[in-house]
Image: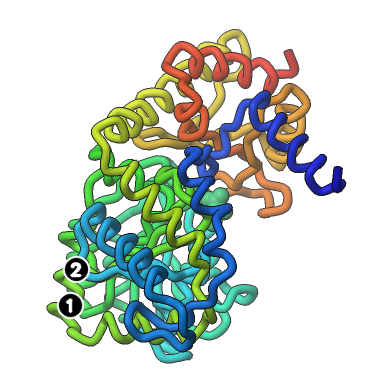
Amino acid sequence: MDKIFELIEKEEEQQKELVYLIPSENFISENVKKALGSDLSNKYAEGYVGKRYYQGNKIIDEIEQLAIDRGKKLFGVEYLNVQPYSGSPANGAVLMGLVNPGKTICGLKLSSGGHLTHGHPNITFSGKFFNSVQYDVNDEGKIEYNKLYQLVDQTRPKLIFAGTTAYPWILDWKKFGEIANSVGAYLVADISHIAGLIVGGVHPDPVPFVDIITSTTHKTLRGPRGAIIGVTKKGLDKNANLTKLIDRAVFPGLQGGPHMATIAAMAVAFEEDALPEFKLYAKQIVKNAQALKIGLIEGAQGFAPIHIFGTENHLMVVDVGFEKGKEVAVKLEEKGIIVNANTIPHDKGSPFKPSGIRIGSPAMTTRGWKEKEFADIGQKIANIINNQ
Ligand code: DSN
């Protein structure tokens, strides 16, 4: 057997055995996998439905249109672009389409649970080509909307990102909307982490309050690695050209041919995400995260209490001691538990030596775990943190 297939088999076996608690990971269905591995990979389809630069795309057009229609219904948006290769290119396209280089943009600090593409300074396109101002969280790890209002008032950004990768609390879309409206900024909800919770009805929906949503389609949505950009009614009312600006920025602005197998897999996932079972799954994710937290607290009894940031959603960030995040993550891996090292709010360590770990429940909830299993694994993690 080709070595590569041996390695794939090994990885597949491992994925059945280990405990996956990285909040951005999940397990796709057999149908999503089937679409991803299909012959759609063979086709080039630069352009959009009905306007392709290559021939032979009649069926491809139907597939992309189906993904768009299902996604629009699922997210409740007026327009959807399903071509972004992943979350970072999606946010890149939004910036390219809506903000001129050098203008001010605003996002949550990476070290406080934001994302690289939301204006992380110096090393990312969003921090290099735009004047990035960043907001922060308080000691509890919560966004302080009053401070954000002041920052926005002083700096008058053209675009504000409301979105997170390591934020365990519910986001207040209404407040974000009021803040963006106060300076006429575009408001972009990057819902990559919580999209499944939103469509599953266990996190408030940003659509009435924002102009644009971006989201990866893996994570809590359980689709393929890819992303979408949606424009809301509010966004269209603000600027009827938004759809054109976004389309042009995705292609030809940033990308070439869309990955059609991925887009077909998205259509499959969107159908699955609209089923009543998915609502139960989303509910269970949150219940399981709560149970995990209780397990961590119980497991730490007799030791110094573990400080846990969260949780109201699918994840929590756990303070494991100054610069100890990586060490603890490696120790957990040795015991078959997969998490990632993460900064805690106002971490005194660096992103390379952070003081926390990030733990989440989406993947093992897909595997059928309930509160009991999550409470048990929480206790086990607390013991490992305490070298037991
Ligand atoms: N890499 C993703 C995560 O783990 O949250 C964010 O892009």
Q: Secondary structure at mark 1?
A: helix
Way the structure is coloured: rainbow
Residue 339: quadrant of the picture: top right
Q: Is residue 148 visible?
A: no
Q: How many marks?
A: 2
- Determine whether label 1 and label 2 are within 8 Å by CB: yes
x, y percent for residue 382: 61, 19
With 25 as the anchor, is 179 left or right in this view? left
With 306 as the anchor, is 325 left or right in this view? right
Is the CB of the residue bearing disc 2 within 8 angstroms of ligand 1?
A: no
Rendered view: 83 above or below 99: above
Q: CA distance from mark 1 to mark 2?
A: 8 Å
What amino acid type should be assigned to the residue bearing mark 2? Glu
Q: Is residue 261 visible?
A: yes
Dot 1: within a 10 Å radius of its alpha carbon, few (fewer than 14), some, or many (20 or more) residues?
some
With 7 as the anchor, is 84 left or right in this view? left
Q: Residue at x 54, y 81 (%)?
A: 256
x, y percent for residue 70: 27, 56
Mark 2 lies on residue: 78
Residue 17: quadrant of the picture: top right
Mark 1 lies on residue: 236
